[in-house]
Image (cartoon, helix red, strand yellow):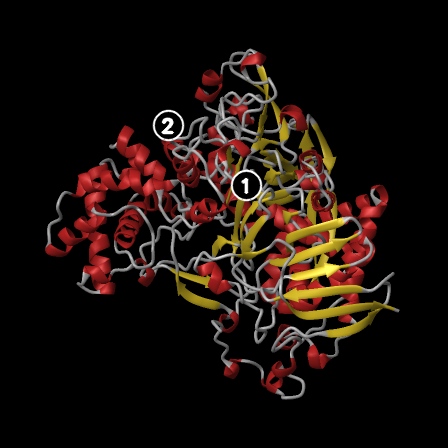
């Protein structure tokens, strides 16, 4: 066991041998039992295999989803209900004032309100789908009805609370919560505007470019110049080079002058703080994911898909491994706990995976307000009011036509426009269609129901492979300085909300969403890099993509291959080479020279002989990372802090490394390197070596990456006793086997808390389906399957997720009354 539980820190009642921790549900192993369940139409068998994967067999879809709800509750009841309350903005009812700011943020963002709207919409317009949500909820509640206080999960006893009855709104609310965590635009526009308020366009563009530095059409999700189904900017009579040379921060594009933005700085900071969730931060800028697909002509085994979504690594994981068989379904993979169906996985005919494409599906609007009125197109309108009560106090959220007012100061406010407030979340329909897919066309059809959050849906069948960037991207009709008009996605700052000129006018048509099917080069990939290049017909002005480092890693591997197989894809998922390090390190060495002391000279030799991998036993990754951390904190972070812009968190944004490379090559006297790149490197090197010598000793060979770089899988209740780690861990923010940590010069570095939440490699034609995730199916701390797959995950090993040929170690039979 990797969990260290200090029983002396727990309430004494929990230690009661009859009512306490020792009889917590599933506290030793999976149980084999038979139970009677109301509402079943027939018997259901749940076989748990030796890897902890549950295989659920039913005669119809009603029973299948009811049994899924029952099983998930039996393994993850506390986690489900915790996230249900978190998403519904009522966590304080369990944890008191510690959860109050999180609850207020949820209501400001509008997640409970949106979930209620989606619930009503699905019930009225998709009654069959709604019945499936009810079936799942019924299964959860059937399990709850079997519990007494004696066998409640430990966390309920720790908090002194009881389970509440599950309902469809909780599934949809958690879906909305996860959607918000993967939504770009609103916060990015505010952070970008804060930069622009104090720096000029060229300065901002060096560290916050429209497209990441060094990206081109070979590296985008949809390869090529951006043309999609024959449509592009050029066909609209617009030059891509002209459009992307423009200053999209100016008032012609936003309706706000720079002076207005400067005056709004306190309000913009206030807005960012108000919507932050201090409890479980799924919205950190280091969240990312990897995926790629291989076509038949590039593989010796037929189409291959690889996927590893990066999420906060929680104990227990947000994923639960499942196979669902019945009612025409036969799907295996991972469900998102609390939501029916399998979100990432495969049928016998299809495979799919998900990564986040970025690109603005939300926007910030500056509103003019007076009391409870807002100003729009020359008239004053009453704001709608939404009232809610927490801990005996009533709060009010005010809505303009754009969305909830998340911050207000004097006669100005900032509202949040988010697609989820305008459109119901139909993702559950997409999930069920994916789970029942039998062809590539079925996968594409399922993507039509994927509204929020936008996702790169990787997909393969027996003969096809590709991507579609599914989701609703709001379009803004912009008039360019040359008089031409163009529909764009997002903005570089908040938009003027007092006029209809900058209001969304629709969404990108499904036909013209970025997409690539059976690419001629044999592969495509989507690790959060730009989705389309500069001739895309709907320019991503609000792109806010990842740095492209992991895209470079994938591309520079695949472009030199002639044919690959599943084992190659597993090896690529475990790759810990940092492409950006290979580009920056020679520039660092050129500036450093040979070093001024014996220890500095030894450090230089480690860098010179380095192959840019980040394994725990290596020394060079430690030296490199602390040089970069000192550089960032002596320059960019210091400059922004001096302007009161620490809220941007520049040290945690992966852009900084390619920014430094770009500046070194193109503007070595930039303000962002204190006017002298070489001097900054030399000073940072000296400070880094001094720090490492002080903290790790004078033996440079002992400065191993595993001594400063640790993983922590943490408990959402923030109880260190229930967390896993610290564990020495591989990788950095730019390696495919990711180990993200901000560039902060502390020893050790801040713990890695975000990473590959699962790894999945699949090839239908060869019947090969492999996966792993850093946890297990159970949340019970004494359950042998609470973290059974973690040691394998740490060592890049996989287990079969084929759905057949497994070894059963437990059998739960649910009998109909």
| Image side of residue 358 versus residue 617, left or right | right
In this view of the protein, which residue sits in the foreground, 775 or 499? 775
Q: Secondary structure at mark 2?
A: helix
**Quick one: 576 or 169, which is closer to the camera?**
576
Q: Quadrant of the C terminus?
A: bottom right
The tag earlier along the polypeptide, 1 or 2, is: 2
- Residue 621 appearing in the image: yes
In the rendered image of this protein, does residue 169 appear above or below residue 411? below
Which residue of the protein is positioned furthest toward the bottom in this rendering? 17
52 left or right, relative to 705: right
Q: Is residue 269 above or below residue 750?
A: above
Q: Residues within 10 Å of mark 2 (few under 14, many from 20)?
A: few
Residue 457: image x %, image y %?
60, 39
What residue is rendered at 61% in x and 21% in y?
229
278 or 49, which lies in front? 49
Left or right, 122 with respect to 652, comes to right
Number of numbered discs visible in the structure rendering:
2
Residue at image point 60% right, 17% down: 230
Q: Which mark is residue 202?
A: 2
Residue 446, x across and y down, in percent: 70, 38
Separation of disc 1 and disc 2 at Cα? 42 Å
Would you name the residue on which mark 1 appears? 304
Q: What is the number of the mark on residue 213?
A: none
Mark 1 Cα shell of 10 Å, populated few (<14), some (14-19), many (≥20): many
Q: Residue 439 location, x and y as percent?
A: 69, 37
Residue 123 visible from this viewpoint: no
**Between marks 1 and 2 in the image, the one whose residue lies nearer the viewer:** 1
Residue at disc 1, secondary structure? strand
Give residue 705's quadrant in the image. bottom left
Q: Position of residue 718 (x, y in %)?
A: 53, 67
User: Image check: 780 left or right of 389?
Assistant: left
């Amino acid at each position: 066991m990797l969990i260290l539980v200090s029983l002396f820190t727990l309430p004494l009642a929990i230690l009661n041998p009859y009512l306490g921790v020792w009889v917590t549900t599933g506290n030793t192993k999976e149980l084999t039992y038979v139970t009677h369940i109301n509402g079943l139409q027939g018997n259901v068998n749940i076989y748990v295999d030796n890897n902890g994967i549950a295989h659920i067999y039913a005669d119809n879809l009603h029973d299948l989803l009811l049994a899924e709800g029952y099983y998930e509750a039996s393994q993850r009841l506390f986690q489900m209900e915790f996230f249900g309350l978190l998403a519904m903005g009522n966590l304080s009812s369990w944890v008191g004032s510690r959860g109050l700011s999180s609850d207020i943020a949820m209501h400001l963002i509008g997640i409970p309100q949106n979930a209620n709207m989606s619930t009503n919409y699905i019930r009225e317009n998709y009654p069959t789908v709604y019945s499936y949500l009810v079936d799942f909820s019924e299964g959860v509640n059937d399990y709850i009805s079997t519990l007494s206080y004696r066998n409640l999960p430990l966390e309920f006893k720790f908090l002194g609370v009881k389970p509440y009855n599950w309902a469809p709104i909780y599934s949809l609310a958690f879906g909305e919560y996860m959607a918000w965590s993967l939504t770009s635009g609103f916060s990015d526009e505010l952070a970008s505007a804060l930069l622009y308020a104090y720096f000029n366009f060229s300065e901002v563009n060096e560290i916050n470019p429209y497209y990441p530095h060094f990206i081109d059409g070979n590296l985008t999700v949809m390869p090529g110049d951006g043309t999609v189904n024959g449509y592009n900017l050029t066909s609209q009579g617009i030059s891509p080079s002209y459009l992307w040379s423009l200053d999209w921060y100016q008032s012609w594009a936003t309706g706000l002058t720079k002076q207005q933005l400067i005056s709004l700085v306190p309000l913009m900071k206030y807005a960012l703080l108000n919507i932050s969730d201090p409890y479980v931060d799924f919205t950190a800028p280091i969240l990312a994911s990897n995926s790629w697909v291989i076509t038949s002509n590039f593989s010796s085994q037929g189409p291959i898909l690889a996927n590893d979504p990066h999420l906060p690594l929680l104990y227990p994981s947000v994923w639960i491994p499942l196979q669902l068989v019945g009612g025409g379904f036969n799907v295996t993979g991972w469900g998102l706990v609390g939501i029916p169906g399998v979100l990432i996985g495969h049928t016998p005919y299809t495979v799919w995976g998900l990564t986040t494409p970025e690109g603005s599906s939300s926007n910030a609007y500056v509103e003019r307000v007076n009391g409870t009125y807002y100003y729009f197109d020359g008239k004053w309108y009453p704001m709608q009011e939404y009232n809610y009560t927490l801990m005996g106090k009533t709060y009010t959220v005010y809505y303009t036509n754009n969305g909830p007012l998340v911050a207000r100061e004097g006669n100005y406010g900032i509202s949040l426009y988010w697609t989820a407030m305008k459109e119901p979340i139909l993702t559950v329909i997409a999930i069920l269609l994916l789970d029942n897919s039998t062809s590539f066309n079925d996968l594409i059809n399922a993507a039509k129901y994927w509204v929020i959050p936008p996702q790169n849906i990787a997909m393969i069948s027996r003969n096809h492979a590709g991507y579609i960037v599914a989701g609703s991207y709001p379009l803004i009709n912009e008039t360019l300085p040359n008089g031409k008009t163009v529909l764009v996605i997002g903005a570089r700052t908040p938009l003027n909300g007092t006029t209809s000129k900058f209001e969304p006018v629709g969404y990108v048509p499904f036909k013209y969403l970025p997409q690539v099917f059976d690419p001629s080069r044999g592969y495509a990939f989507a690790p959060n890099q730009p989705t389309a290049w500069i001739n895309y017909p709907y320019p991503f002005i609000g792109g806010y993509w990842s740095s492209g480092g992991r895209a470079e890693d994938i591309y520079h591997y695949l472009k030199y291959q002639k044919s690959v197989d599943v084992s190659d894809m597993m090896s690529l998922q475990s790759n810990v080479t940092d492409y950006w390090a290979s580009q920056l390190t020679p520039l660092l060495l050129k500036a450093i020279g040979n070093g001024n002391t014996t220890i500095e000279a030894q450090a230089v030799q480690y860098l010179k002989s380095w192959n840019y991998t980040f394994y725990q036993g290596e020394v060079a990754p430690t030296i490199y990372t602390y040089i970069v951390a000192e550089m960032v904190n002596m320059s960019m972070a210091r400059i922004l802090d001096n302007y009161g812009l620490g809220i941007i968190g520049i040290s945690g944004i992966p852009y900084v490394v390619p920014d430094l490379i770009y500046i070194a090559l193109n503007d070595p006297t930039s303000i962002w390197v204190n006017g002298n790149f070489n001097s900054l490197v030399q000073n940072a090197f000296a400070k880094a070596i001094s720090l490492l010598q002080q903290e790790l000793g004078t033996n440079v060979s002992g400065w191993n990456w595993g001594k400063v770089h640790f993983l922590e899988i943490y408990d959402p209740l923030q109880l260190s006793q229930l967390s896993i780690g610290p564990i020495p861990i591989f990788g950095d923010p730019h390696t495919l086997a990711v180990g993200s940590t901000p560039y902060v010069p502390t020893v050790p570095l801040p713990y890695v808390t975000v990473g590959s939440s699962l790894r999945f490699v699949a090839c239908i034609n060869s019947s090969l389906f492999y996966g792993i995730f850093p946890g297990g199916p159970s949340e019970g701390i004494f359950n042998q399957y609470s973290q059974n797959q973690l040691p394998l995950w740490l060592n890049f090993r996989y287990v079969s997720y084929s759905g057949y040929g497994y070894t059963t170690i437990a059998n739960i039979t649910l009998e109909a009354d």
